[in-house]
Amino acid sequence: MTAARVGLVFVSHSDKIADGLRELAGQMAQNAPMAAAGGTDDGRIGTSFGKVSAAIAAVDQGVGVVLLCDLGSAILTAETALDFLDDSVRERVRIVDAPLIEGGVAAAVASEVGGTLHAVMEAAESAGGTTALSAGSAESAEQAEPEPASGYSRTVTLINKDGLHARPAADFVKLANTFPARVTVNGTDARSLLGIMAMGLVKGTTIVLASEDPVGSDAVDALATLVESGFGEA
């Protein structure tokens, strides 16, 4: 029996944006329950109480539902939909303050790996300030060599031609989440999709996988093997 996962609802004024985000996130999190609630009931730009309510019901597997919204009135529609839920359902449904696209992708990967409602919300909210983080991290990736790591570590070179873009980054983060030990990638948490993608790792980049955890060697070795495989793209 498949374990229940936290559901996601993407609320946008545009049905194309909501559907596109579901498609994008689905490329990285095939098993996460997701629903798009974009546009009005008759296909115009706007939001729909009925679409949001139906989307919540469609993705609710009993362990929580997270809603991400694009503009202010989308939040109002989502809040209205929550008001009409049964108390037992409403207590496990949350609206998060996060960028729709980046937050939606991060939340989808967190749901895919079986994250709790809190973990999925935290993943979505971690997308705040991604642009600034990305610029700074990309610059540091070009200019700085990885710091020497203590504990158990492996140094590997990224070989896949397109670097660590969204799909392999998601595979990397999902694997990291299967281990209890914390692993870092050049100092960044290996479980953070946005943190990894913000590093701007390109082909030929040398990265240090490290863990201070006494039982972290298996996780480091598994992640190193995945990187060295080229994620099937090399």
Image (cartoon, rainbow, N blue to C red):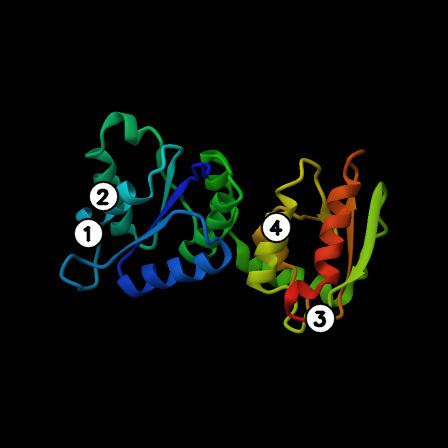
Q: Earlier in the sequence, mark 3 or mark 4?
A: 4
Q: Earlier in the sequence, mark 2 or mark 4?
A: 2
Mark 3 to mark 4: distance in Å?
18 Å
Q: Which residue is mark 1?
A: 48
Q: Amino acid at mark 3?
A: Lys
Question: Does residue 164 appear to the left or right of 62 in the view shown?
Answer: right
Residue 20 lies, in percent from the top left, at 37, 64
> Which of the 4 image quarters holds residue 200?
bottom right
Query: At 29% across and 46% down in the image, what residue appears?
Result: 75
Within-10-Å neighbours for mark 4: few <14, some 14–19, many 20+:
many
Residue 203 marker:
3
Residue 16 lies, in percent from the top left, at 30, 65
Q: Which residue is mark 2?
A: 53
Direction top: furthest residue = 88
Query: At 86% across and 43% down in the image, what residue appears?
Result: 150
Q: Which residue is mark 4?
A: 173
Mark 3 to mark 1: distance in Å?
44 Å
